[in-house]
Image (cartoon, coloured by chain):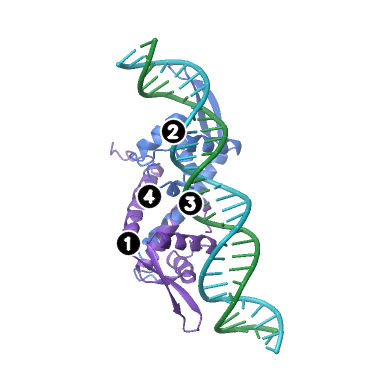
Chain colours: A purple, B blue, C cyan, D green
Amino acid sequence: MKLDKGLMAGSGAMLVLKLLESGDMYGYQMIEELSRRSNQVFQMQEGTLYPILHGLEKDKYLSSYQQQAPTGRMRKYYKLTKKGRQLLAEKQAEWARFHQGVQDVLSGGADALGLA
Amino acid sequence: MKLDKGLMAGSGAMLVLKLLESGDMYGYQMIEELSRRSNQVFQMQEGTLYPILHGLEKDKYLSSYQQQAPTGRMRKYYKLTKKGRQLLAEKQAEWARFHQGVQDVLSGGADALGLA
DNA sequence: ATATTATACCTAGAATATCAAGGTATATTT
DNA sequence: AAATATACCTTGATATTCTAGGTATAATAT
């Protein structure tokens, strides 16, 4: 990513799962789509993406199939499984919690506005 | 943290710097204060905190001094330097960018609402 | 025709950050 | 006197990303 490497850690899988929620995609496409949807904030590297895809497929969060592109080239498409949708829901919930925690701290504490 | 370990990666230093913006603190206190301000979302481990503090001090983002507690025990207080304030500002800006990117993707893409 | 670029997949090794689990020591509480 | 809370620290394991390669086909430029 163009961002600090550390920030991305832990979110990569969630973002990939999210992309696939809108339809099957192949790896190369995911990198472009992630960049597009994030307004070029995320420039995921192939060396980041492929290990994520292989790990998610190994654990049955994704399935894959080969399909020929109009150009004749073969592409490996990934599809979200039911288990994968569940994982996405969990990761989004965890992200919400994490994000709220950060916002609370950055705003001077959860009780900074008299909520204590 | 109670959260997925990966999510925290990259934010630890920012959170520590943010705590110190409101006043000098010692390590043990930071862990409690971070938990309090985040509504118990962040339970930073000592093995995470102390290396962060040592690294930030080594690079002059923090300075430290010893002070005796009312109990008689010695405490090691950390203080934000000018350089540290600058780093905090940068990290907060980067967090905002990152956060916006994630929100854009989770909401279906930056142009999901017709902004394309 | 040939060379370069874009597409499309992959992996190995290095760097970084967190956590688990330990250690040391003092103060308080039981 | 023993157990717990406070307060500091370090080592090694784990996880994630990135860098930097590799392979191969299709499209474009020279």
Nearer to us: label 1 or label 2: 1
**Tags 1 and 2 both on a single chain:** no
Label 2 packing within 10 angstroms: few (<14), some (14-19), many (20+): many
Q: Which residue is labeled 4 in the image?
A: A99
Residue at x 42% of width, y 63% of height: A57
Give the CA distance from mark 1 to mark 4.
21 Å
Q: How many marks?
A: 4
Label 4 packing within 10 angstroms: few (<14), some (14-19), many (20+): some
Q: Chain of mark 2?
A: B
* In the image, farthest residue toward the left: A115
**Tags 1 and 4 both on a single chain:** yes
Q: Position of residue B49 (x, y in %)?
A: 48, 36
Q: Amino acid at mark 1?
A: Arg
Give the CA distance from mark 1 to mark 3.
23 Å
Nearer to us: label 1 or label 4: 1
Quarter residue B40 falls in = top left
Residue at x 37% of width, y 49% of height: A99
Q: Which residue is labeled 3 in the image?
A: A7
Q: Amino acid at mark 4?
A: His
Q: Position of residue A51 (x, y in %)?
A: 49, 60
Q: Which residue is labeled 2 in the image?
A: B30
Q: Chain of mark 3?
A: A
Q: Amino acid at mark 3?
A: Leu
Image check: B39 left or right of B64? left
